[in-house]
Image (tube, rainbow, N blue to C red):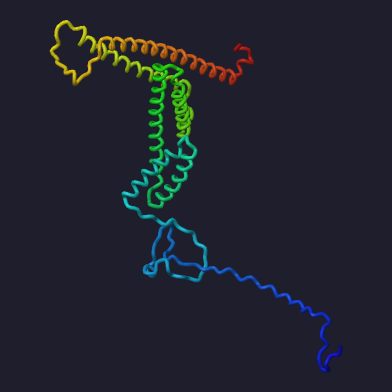
Amino acid sequence: MTQPIGLNKLPINNHPEPHQKQAKERPHPPIEDTVSLGFQWEANTLVPSASTQDAFFTTVVTKTQPVQRPAIPIHLSDQKLNRLLDDYQAMVQQSRAPNVLLATYGWIKLNGLTLILLASGIPFAELESRRKQAIQDAVEDNKLKFADNEYNLEMIQLITPQKNAKKTIASLTKIRNELCVHMAKLGKDDWYTPQHINRIQHNQVDRINTYFNDEESQLNAQKNHYYNTQAPSTVTVRISDYDLDSLDDINQKLNRLALYKHAVSQRKAYLDQHYETLMGYDNLDTMNAHTETLGLSKSGIVQ
């Protein structure tokens, strides 16, 4: 096949020529725009300038210069501030709860409240004072709850058969352990020692014994007033206003109270003996510690 005269010779293949590689473009420098907040930095306070009071947070400048961000004050009403302070004390106590989830939530909220209160102008010394007071209140509340829990535990063990109170005793024992953990998180790791728990139990048994004595005196007074008096009484009581117990019921209650009081005396004797044993172990541990410190056993003085 002939080609026309005057035309360039066509290539044999019909593939187009590859495109030339484009030159690599230089990356554009990052655009650094800074918006002026319209105030002057003086220490850590916010002082609006006179020229930018009308255009506060709107003036745009082109000069870029890193500056330190100050603490912008937060203005709250007195009512809102007092409520936040109460929440702060509550979160201080909740952050030391025996429950892990509640304690974690308390710590997170406590950190946020601390920042807000500091930015609101509350001095750190006042927050520290409130924190200590909150912990002290939590400690006293823990003591009362522990004593009431031991009271319930001792009462159930005294008046209820063991086989009928297993679940209740297990629940109260679990509460005791949680209160011990709570007290440790409040900063008093060695508060509920075996010796201290023994004395708390002894005090609660005394409370129960006082309750039984009061009940016994009331029953005896009722018995003597209505059944053991020869002369007619001058006090008139309407049956509709007061349901009088029979003599047999009063005697049955007195007999049951006598059994309970005997169990109380046995429990107190056991606690006293156990306390002496615990103190003996404590003294023995102290003596062994001194012996090891002074090296008396190695010298043959202590056999």
User: Above or below — where is 190 with respect to 242?
Assistant: below
Horizontal side of residue 112 vs 28, given as left or right:
left
Name the residue located 18 percent from the left edge and 7 percent from the top edge.
Answer: 229
Residue 211: image quadrant is top left
User: Above or below — where is 36 with respect to 44?
Assistant: below
Horizontal side of residue 224 vs 41, given as left or right:
left
- In which quadrant will I find the C terminus? top right
Name the residue located 86 percent from the left edge and 88 percent from the top edge.
Answer: 1
User: Above or below — where is 246 with respect to 99?
Assistant: above
| Of 110 and 130, the residue lying toward us | 110
Q: Which residue lies most toward the front here?
A: 1
| Of 82 and 156, the residue lying toward us | 156
Residue 292: image quadrant is top right
Q: Position of residue 291 (x, y in %)?
A: 58, 17
Q: Position of residue 190 (x, y in %)?
A: 48, 27
Q: Position of residue 134 (x, y in %)?
A: 39, 38
Name the residue located 37 percent from the left edge and 47 percent from the top edge.
Answer: 84
